[in-house]
Image (cartoon, rainbow, N blue to C red):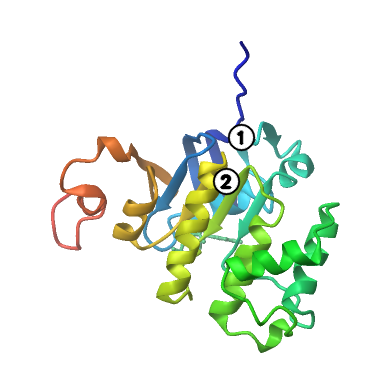
């Protein structure tokens, strides 16, 4: 009997230097297929840099990194075809409609999605009725919803999301939560960053705490004490004036 093993994300000794500054240092973790992991940490701890490297938008300085089985940076082009990304900036084409943005993205990935599929996807992210409106007429939250639709359009094996709940209303938060759980159920390996510690505790099953570019904690949901993730986080970052 053969068991299909999908690779997910494997990161060993990832280091990123920009100039003389070390942004990430010897970061180690892995995310299995069908797992949702959250990276948390204070402003400037390196979350965005980590996600950008995994999304092949930035080169690592050192380390052994595999995304969907492809080593980075060597096989970045192939890795990219397996990855869906939501970044801080939605990076949409503002003079195209929502539908045209998705059609364009699908073509970049050599996909042809039917009008019906695109309508269904836009409906799924709560943009029914706005399919043929120009993106420049969209609110921040609507643009975020469209960026989420674009990220899942090709049904990627890997999803990388930088603070994806920012700008969403409470219905949008529920919608995204459902989408992420469905994607994980279908086998996607998901990594998202957030500042909402209680929020990610409900969603994810592995938590990575970054502190000044170092992986301070990597803990599974089942390993958390009854005090939960917030107490682990607070121990990592005691308020100023309190002893570590
Ligand atoms: N292009 C760059 N040149 C120099 N330093 C950079 C560059 N990009 C990021 N940094 C530095 O790297 C560190 C990590 O930044 P990063 O954006 O990854 O943090 P973050 O955890 O995502 O922060 P936030 O929670 O504020 O979004 C910061 O000190 C930042 O100043």
Residue extending furthest top? 1
Q: Where is residue 122 in the image (x, y as percent from the top left)?
A: 65, 69
Mark 1 Cα within 10 Å, few/some/many (few <14, many 20+)?
many
Quarter the N terminus occupies: top right
Give the mark, 2 or 1, whose residue is nearer the N terminus: 2
Residue 22 visible to the viewer: no
Q: In this view, does 19 lie to the left or right of 153?
A: left
Q: In this view, does 171 lie above or below 2?
A: below
Q: Of residues 72 and 61, which is closer to you in this image?
A: 72
The residue that label 1 is drawn on is: 65
Measure how far apart labels 2 and 1 are at the Cα level: 12 Å
What kind of element bears circle 2?
strand
Callout in the foreground (2, 1): 1
Residue extending furthest bottom? 137
Q: Position of residue 89 (x, y in %)?
A: 61, 71
Q: Of residues 61 and 58, which is closer to you in this image?
A: 58
- The residue sitting at 74% across, 81% down in the picture is 94
The residue that label 2 is drawn on is: 16
Q: How many marks?
A: 2
- The residue sitting at 76% across, 73% down in the picture is 99
Q: Position of residue 213 (x, y in %)?
A: 45, 48
Q: Where is residue 189 in the image (x, y as percent from the top left)?
A: 55, 41
């Amino acid at each position: 009997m053969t068991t299909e093993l999908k690779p997910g994300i494997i990161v060993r000794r990832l280091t990123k230097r920009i100039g003389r500054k070390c942004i990430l240092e010897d970061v180690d973790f892995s995310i299995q297929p069908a797992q949702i992991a959250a990276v948390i940490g204070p402003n400037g701890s390196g979350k965005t840099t980590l996600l950008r490297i995994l999304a092949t938008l930035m080169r690592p300085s050192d380390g052994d990194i595999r995304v969907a089985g492809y080593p980075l940076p060597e096989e970045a082009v192939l890795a990219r075809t397996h990855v869906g990304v939501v970044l801080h900036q939605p990076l949409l084409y503002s003079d195209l409609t929502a539908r045209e943005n998705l059609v364009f993205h699908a073509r970049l990935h050599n996909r042809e999605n039917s009008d019906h599929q695109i309508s269904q996807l836009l409906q799924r992210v709560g943009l029914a009725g706005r399919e043929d409106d120009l993106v420049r007429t969209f609110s921040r939250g609507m643009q975020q919803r469209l960026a989420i639709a674009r990220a899942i359009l090709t049904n990627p094996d890997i999803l990388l999301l930088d603070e994806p709940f920012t700008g969403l209303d409470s219905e949008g938060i529920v919608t995204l939560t459902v989408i992420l759980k469905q994607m994980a159920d279908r086998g996607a390996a998901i990594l998202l960053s957030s500042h909402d510690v209680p929020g990610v505790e409900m969603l994810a099953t592995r938590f990575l705490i970054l502190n000044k570019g170092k992986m301070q904690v990597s803990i599974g949901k089942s390993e958390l004490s009854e005090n939960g993730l917030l107490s682990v986080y607070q121990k990592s970052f005691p308020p100023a004036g309190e002893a570590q």
